């Protein structure tokens, strides 16, 4: 891996902004679309840039190869379920809360990594980071102004969606030798296949009359926050490695709160800021522990 240059930091910030912008766009999309439709349109539009790149680079898509069941399972767990849960949850809670809740992904990854990988075991610093990060989430749930009995379950569903991302990431290790573009393209194809009958039966989106704002948001979610963002992530990973790329975890909730305030005027309470600080500190310790000998 080469030393990061200015362009690498710019791309990292761009990736963080694109992923952070997904949350307020999901909120806008829920004004006209149901959660299953949002999930379907995200994977549909998200597949376009990925599959075009695979075609351009002549990368074989193995969605229907002998490993098809892995692609289908990962597509279901890593895309279908979290995209649905997040869209369902954001309809009832502020999108800036979703940005913080989704920031727990590195913390959940650390826990699963300890049990399901050989070289990602707990050490003191990593354990401390996980405890601090999740303490921030517990504290966030005490904010009765933003999370109450009417949307408590919605917040939990968003948290469950972030956990599905982690489980999907662990399953992806089973096919880690395949090209990233191939894996992403294949799981997107299977996510589309899975969602077609679900969206047709439950929400019938062809009967909707969506607003222009919601339509733009859902196209943006697919093309940019799903498709192009994943391709940008691949570039950063290839050039600078996982540790450098993982820094987006610090920036996404921060940008998510700022963008939600700018575009939607969402309330920022002191408990939101304290929770955000604890989550970012927790992620920092978890990432820092990668350079510390495991005990």
Image (spheres, rainbow, N blue to C red):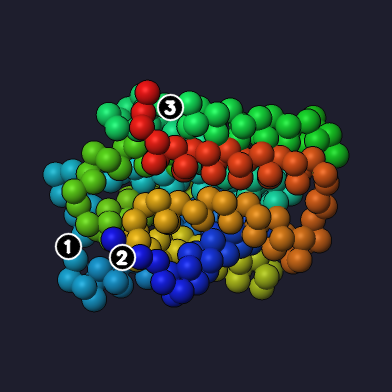
Q: Please state if 264 lies on the left or on the right of 203 as rendered.
A: right
150 shown above or below 201: above
Contact check, label 2 and label 1, Cβ < 8 Å? no
Q: Nearer the viewer, mark 3 or mark 1?
A: 3
117 shown above or below 17: above
Residue occupied by mark 1 = 60
Residue occupied by mark 3 = 123
| Callout 3: SS | loop
Q: Please state if 251 lies on the left or on the right of 242 as rendered.
A: right
Write the residue at 82% across / 52% down: 267
Q: Categorize mark 1 by other alpha carbons within 10 Å: few (<14), some (14-19), many (20+).
A: some
Measured as percent of width and height from the top left, residue 294 is found at 36, 28
Measured as percent of width and height from the top left, residue 140 is found at 73, 36
Measured as percent of width and height from the top left, residue 247 is found at 49, 54
Q: Categorize mark 3 by other alpha carbons within 10 Å: few (<14), some (14-19), many (20+).
A: some
Spatial CA distance of label 2 from label 1 is 28 Å
Q: Which image quarter is the C terminus in?
A: top left
Write the residue at 42% across / 56% down: 244
Nearer-the-camera pick, 71 or 274: 274
| Callout 2: SS | loop
Q: Please state if 62 lies on the left or on the right of 35 as rendered.
A: left
Write the residue at 31% across / 65% down: 2
Residue occupied by mark 2 = 2
Spatial CA distance of label 3 from label 1 is 40 Å
Q: Categorize mark 2 by other alpha carbons within 10 Å: few (<14), some (14-19), many (20+).
A: few
């Amino acid at each position: 891996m080469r030393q990061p240059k200015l362009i690498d930091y710019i791309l990292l910030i761009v990736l963080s902004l694109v992923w952070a912008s997904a949350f307020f766009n999901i909120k806008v999309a829920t004004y006209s679309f149901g959660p299953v439709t949002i999930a379907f349109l995200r994977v549909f539009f998200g597949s376009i840039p990925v599959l075009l790149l695979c075609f351009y680079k002549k990368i074989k898509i193995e969605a229907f190869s002998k490993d098809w069941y892995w692609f289908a399972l990962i597509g279901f767990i890593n895309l279908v379920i979290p995209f649905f849960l997040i869209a369902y949850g954001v309809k009832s809670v502020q999108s800036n809360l979703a940005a913080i809740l989704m920031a727990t992904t590195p913390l959940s990854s650390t826990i699963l990594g300890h049990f399901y990988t050989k070289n990602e075991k707990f050490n003191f610093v990593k354990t401390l980071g996980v405890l601090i990060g999740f303490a921030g989430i517990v504290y966030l749930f005490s904010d009765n102004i933003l999370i109450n009995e009417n949307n408590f379950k919605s917040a939990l569903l968003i948290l469950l969606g972030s956990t599905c991302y982690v489980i999907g990431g662990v399953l992806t290790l089973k096919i880690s030798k395949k090209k990233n573009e191939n894996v992403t393209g294949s799981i997107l194809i299977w996510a589309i296949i899975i969602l077609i009958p679900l969206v047709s039966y439950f929400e019938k989106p062809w009967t909707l009359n969506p607003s222009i704002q919601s339509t733009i948001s859902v196209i943006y979610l697919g093309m940019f926050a799903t498709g192009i963002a994943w391709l940008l992530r691949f570039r950063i990973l290839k050039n600078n490695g996982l540790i450098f790329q993982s820094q987006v975890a610090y920036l996404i909730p921060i940008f998510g709160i700022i963008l939600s305030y700018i575009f939607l005027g969402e309330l920022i309470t002191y408990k939101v800021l304290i929770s955000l600080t604890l989550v970012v500190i927790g992620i920092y310790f978890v990432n820092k522990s990668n350079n510390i000998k495991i005990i």
